[in-house]
Image (cartoon, rainbow, N blue to C red):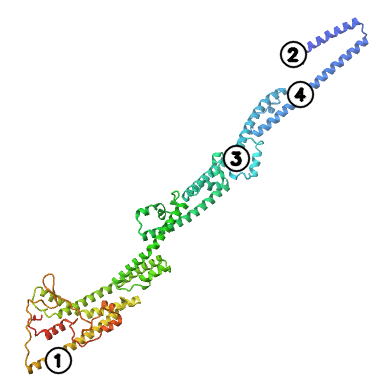
Amino acid sequence: MLAIGSPNYSVRTSTSCNALLRELQQIWSDIGESEAEKDRILMELERECLEVYRRKVEEAANAKARLHQAVAAKEAELATLMAALGELNIHSPIQTEKRSTSLKEKLASIAPLVEDLRTKKEERMKQFADIKAQIEKISGEISGYDHLSNSLINSLSLEEEDLSLRRITECQTHLRTLQKEKSDRLNRVLEYVNEVHSICGVLGLDFGQTVSDVHPSLHGTAMGHSTNISNSTLEGLEHAIVKLKAERKIRIQKLKDIVVSLFELWNLMDSPIQYKNSFSKITSILRLSESEITEPGVLSTEVIEQASTEVERLTKLKATRMKELVLKKRSELEEICKMTHIEPDTSTAAEKSNAMIDSGLVDPSELLANIEAQIVKVKDEALSRKDIMDRIDRWLYACEEEKWLEEYNQDDNRYNAGRGAHIILKRAERARVTVSKIPAIVDNLINRTLAWEEEKKIFFLYDGVRLVSILDDYKLTRVQREEEKKRYRDQKKMQDLLLTEKEAIYGSKPSPRKSNSFRKPNGCRANGNGSMTPTPRRNSIGSGTPELLTPRSYSSRQNGHFREMRRLSTAPLNFVAISKEDTMSSYTSVCGSEPGSPPQG
């Protein structure tokens, strides 16, 4: 089809109009129209043609205006899309407007760009919507869906105005930050939950109920609910852990107290090891720190109740045996006191202890602990008395030797030659040396005892009597014995003198024949090697010699009986505890004239 403005189109139109005009004039000629009518018709025909042209021009102008408007709208939309998407590197058709002569070409060139940017905008909108949804979801999880910050809402509402890559990068960065925070919170929640699970296992508590009390999403997440990681949940878990740790600490201390009581009762009752091993699960906490106690159920109420029941059972059993244990410990105390010559505390005597236990006035455990403390005290005191006790033993040994020597001197057959006689004579010689040291031993013992009393600020008691008093009485008695022996010797000399004078006046009386060597010596017994050993003679209370007081004799007689034992008698005295020279002189004066006496060495 030819264009309206083209030359061919004008020639063709002019030819058609001329042909029609000639055909009209021919018709008018045939009709016989007048010239005036013909002019009127031609004028009307020209007016109608102008009207048609005018209408077509208006229609074309309207079409052009619409195209201008469409192009302007497309260009505005293009500019908006480019600004929103940040696509500044696209060449706009506006920049090439001078080279373009057709509005339709402009419109045709803009439309594909607009459509392309629309598609890209929709993709960006979907991407922003996805990021927005994730941000809102994570922010809601972090905040607990209570509220979102206004800045976050405003930034998300401006997404349609700014869909640039820079904006989407910022949103993605923000999303990654939230995702990292969510991951950190999830790790903290899982760490707290694991700790709660561990402590609940040790305490024997319901883990599910414990975490559900904090937030239901922490237990039973299979229902499709995500784990709550809000601040309130974290704070709730922290509070639950603090509460569980406090409960664990209380139970550990309670169980430790029970275990200590168990060990005390087991040791007291001498429980077998096999029986103790059945409680090894709870006794192990004594050597473990709080963080090391991880065995499930070890701090449960059932285990604590079981241990408490065992303590109650052993306590009841202990009460039935405590009296026996108290008496056993008291016997041990008395035995130690007897060995160390220390008077035991009378407040825990067997009779008093039984009476106090039966009446319930005292706890048997306290009474037993008191006796054990007394045992320790006696042992410590015995250790401090050891030096003096050793010297007392030396003194007692010397006294025993003195007693033996006295009995030996009373034996009339002591000088008879026989098997083993020389051994007895040597022992007698050693006994005389030992007896001669008694005064020095006693004086040294008194000095040591007084020094001990000065240091300890208490009296040194020996079987309940002050040792210094015993030693002083012993020295006094010894002086009296020496005086008695001297008086006896003087009396003996006077008797000998009177006998000599009597014999001079009336003549001597023949003495009876002494027994031969085959006769068993009086007061002697045969020892294992066939020799004869002097047999100790028992002196009656009525004998003339006062008994020398030693700690053993003193403690058995006490003060009143001791005074009775100190009474002096006028009967002849025996030779006891005299020095070697006095003994030998006595032998010369009393026995020297007897036939068969050995020469004096």
At x 84%, y 16%, the residue is: 49
Q: CA distance from mark 3 to mark 2?
A: 65 Å
Residue under the point 19% across and 89% down: 487
Eye-nearest disc, 3 or 1: 1
* Residue at mark 2: 2
User: Along the polypeptide, which appears first: circle 3 or circle 2?
Assistant: 2
Measured in 3D between alpha carbons, the distance from the residue under mark 4 to the one under mark 2, in whole angstroms, is 20 Å
Labels 3 and 2 touching (C-beta < 8 A): no
- Mark carried by residue 64: 4
Picture coordinates of residue 120, whole percent (x, y): 63, 30
Q: Which residue is mark 3?
A: 137
Q: Work out whether residue 419 or residue 453 is closer to the camera in this orientation and state it.
A: 419
C-alpha separation, residue under disc 4 versus residue under disc 3: 52 Å
SS state under label 2 = loop
- Mark 3 vs mark 2: in front: 3
Residue type indicated by callout 4: Lys
Which mark is drawn over residue 11?
Answer: none
Three-letter amino acid code at the position of disc 1: Met
Q: Earlier in the sequence, mark 3 or mark 1?
A: 3
Determine contact: label 2, label 1, CB under 8 Å: no
In whole angstroms, how far apart are the C-alphas of marks 1 and 4? 187 Å
Question: Mark 4 or mark 2: which comes first in sequence?
Answer: 2
- Disc 2 crowd, CA 10 A, few/some/many (<14, 14-19, 20+): few
Look at the image and tell me whether residue 99 can be seen: no
| Quadrant (top left, top right, bottom left, bottom right) of the N terminus | top right
